[in-house]
Image (cartoon, helix red, strand yellow):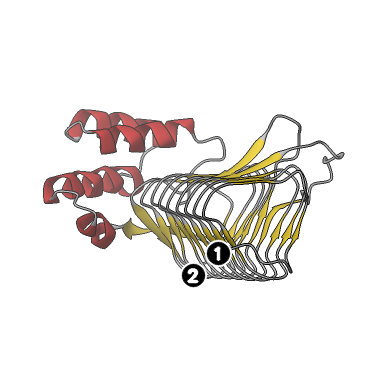
Amino acid sequence: MISPLASIHPSAKIGKNVTIYPFVFIDKDVEIGDNNVIMPNASIMNGARIGNGNTIYNGAVIAATPQDFKYTGDETIARIGDNNTIRENAVIIRATFAGDETVLGNGNFVMQGARISHDVKVGNNCIIGNGSQVSGCCIIEDCAILTSNVLMQGNTRLGTYAAVQGGCRFTKDIPPYCIAAHEPTAYYGINAAVLQHEGFSDTVIKHIAHAYRILYKANTSTEDALRRIEEQVPASPEIAHIVEFVRQSKLGIIK
């Protein structure tokens, strides 16, 4: 199941039932778990740590050297979890400083030509759309969606179950459960269709919508809006996460 035409460094650690096609390059200091499929011309570079059950398509690059002027040659990590799909020519870049990691969790779909930069943290079950670019040190929470050709500025954060429409670029954080759209990128509404599909109750969805009406339409300060949400919207993990996310935002949230 490992082609003799693949170039594999003798120190690379490869698990059980791994299929490696011709012309794959696997560097030193690489660890690959079980049941992975690595297709032709993919490059698994120094510092890659790949879990189980992933499919890595043609031309993808895992653990590329950081495109960061602060990088001085440290040995760093790009950690890929389990059951991810990484499509053609996608690039995942390892961290900048020793001891740090770029992380892609479990069950994610990274589409053709997408780039995940140094020190990015991606949760589970996310979609990174065709050609989308995630700059350094960003955080993407579970079940978030970047559609095609989105530009995510460095150090920004995308909340769980949030979705960003195609072609957007944003420099502020996007809170959980909402849709971001337009240019400049702004709050467009809650991600109701996805929330319903994922089993959120109608009551919880209504409470999320109520919280965002207060946050975006109450014509008051952000902190006052958060206090009103805590006072007026029934408590739930979802409402608590919205409040916590906004309060902890270092760059502020989209308008």
Disc 1, SS: loop
Disc 2, SS: loop
Between residue 232 and residue 250, name the one nearer to us: 250
Q: Which image quadrant for residue 137?
A: top right
Q: Amino acid at mark 2?
A: Gly
Circles 1 and 2: CB distance less than 8 Å? yes
- Number of marks drawn: 2
Q: Amino acid at mark 1?
A: Val
Q: Earlier in the sequence, mark 1 or mark 2?
A: 1
Q: Residues within 10 Å of mark 2 (few under 14, many from 20)?
A: some
Q: Position of residue 147 (x, y in %)?
A: 47, 66
Between residue 152 and residue 41, name the one nearer to us: 41
Q: Answer left or right for 252 relative to 213.
A: right
Q: Answer left or right for 121 relative to 30.
A: left
Q: Quadrant of the N terminus?
A: bottom right
Q: Which image quadrant for residue 190?
A: bottom left
Q: Can residue 229 be seen from the camera position used here?
A: yes
> What label sits on residue 150 in the rendered view?
1
Q: Is residue 97 placed above or below 184 in the rendered structure?
A: above
Q: Position of residue 96 (x, y in %)?
A: 75, 40
Q: Which image quadrant for residue 26?
A: bottom right
Between residue 72 and residue 192, name the one nearer to us: 72
Q: Which residue is mark 2?
A: 166
Q: Is residue 22 placed above or below 84 in the rendered structure?
A: below
Q: Position of residue 83 (x, y in %)?
A: 45, 53
| Residue under the image location 68 percent in, 33 percent down | 100
Inter-mark Cα distance, 1 to 2:
6 Å
> What label sits on residue 49 in the rendered view?
none
Q: Residues within 10 Å of mark 1 (few under 14, many from 20)?
A: many
